[in-house]
Image (spheres, grey):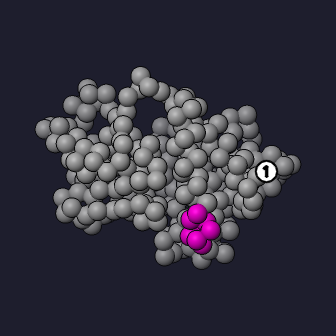
Amino acid sequence: MDIQSLGYRTDLIFPKFDGQILDRGDYLVILTPTNPTYYWGNFLLFPKPPKGNDLENWKAIFSKEIGSQINAEHFTFGWDTIVGDLGEIKPFLDAGFDLSQSVVLSTQEVKMPTKYNQEAVIRPLTDNLDWEQATQNQIACRDPEHTFEDYQIFKRDQMKRYRLMAKAGMGLWFGAFLGKKLVADLGVFATEDIGRFQNVGTHPNFRRLGICGALVYEASCYAFEYMKIKTLVMVADEHYHAAKIYESVGFQPKEHQAGLTWWDKSKS
């Protein structure tokens, strides 16, 4: 299955490292056995949006392909769209699925944002303390619908992956520091000459201070100069203000991405 979407294409950088991508012709199976609670690390990618009778069919495929391999307590489906078409999602929404809509932004050059925090020191993470601070910051930035207990299990496994990828020379994780305290972080990882940002997170107590824009700008400059990346890709929630911050650095919307996820919220 050939993937048109730049967003989903760069998503696959990560399971290629420590997971599995199985091409079934009519769909892709993406597995991350090291992190079974990672919804978007264990999902199905279809070539087209859902039709009216796809709910039970897609769930059955998921149970066969993913549920039989890991202890998955979720269902996650994506489809290869570049315009964000949704198809017939009502049966999924009626069954308790959440719709994810993202904008895919990219750039080949960046500009310093107008709102730029001059006090923040931005650099790659270097030691255990840096990585622990970044992990704690990522947990602090979680969506309120996820409990601390459950989310930290997922996030610690995910950050272990990123650290191993950085060690393997596939990318870097950057932090923005005020003094010795990390207050924002993100990752940049590459496949050939395309770089993909991951998990831009600013601590809730340090938002709207120009730190995020400065972090994205400096990490982008580093990626272009030292990682020899020609195109940087960022995926952001369409309904979240962060996309405007990325645009202030020079990223431009190119595509729209969609997906569906279900998990038992009574356990959250």
Is residue 82 rendered to the left or right of residue 48? right
Question: In the image, is residue 168 part of the stretch drawn in magenta?
Answer: yes
As drawn, is 110 to the left or to the right of 161? Answer: right
Residue at 54%, 29% in the rendered image: 147
Q: Amino acid at mark 1?
A: Phe
Q: Residue visible at 74% across and 38% down?
A: 206
Location of mark 1 (residue): 177
Magenta stretch? 164-171
201 versus 92 height, above or below: below
Position of residue 57 measured from the top left corner of the image (x, y, whole percent): 16, 42
Q: Secondary structure at mark 1?
A: strand
- What residue appears at the point 76 percent right and 47 percent down from the top-left corner? 182
Whole-percent x, y for residue 219 in the image: 67, 62
The reply to whether residue 250 is in sight is no
Instruction: In this rendered view, identify the residue nearer to me: 108 or 87.
Output: 87
Residue at x 54% of width, y 51% of height = 158
Mark 1 closeness class: few <14, some 14–19, many ≥20 residues within 10 Å: some
Q: Is residue 232 one of those drawn in magenta?
A: no
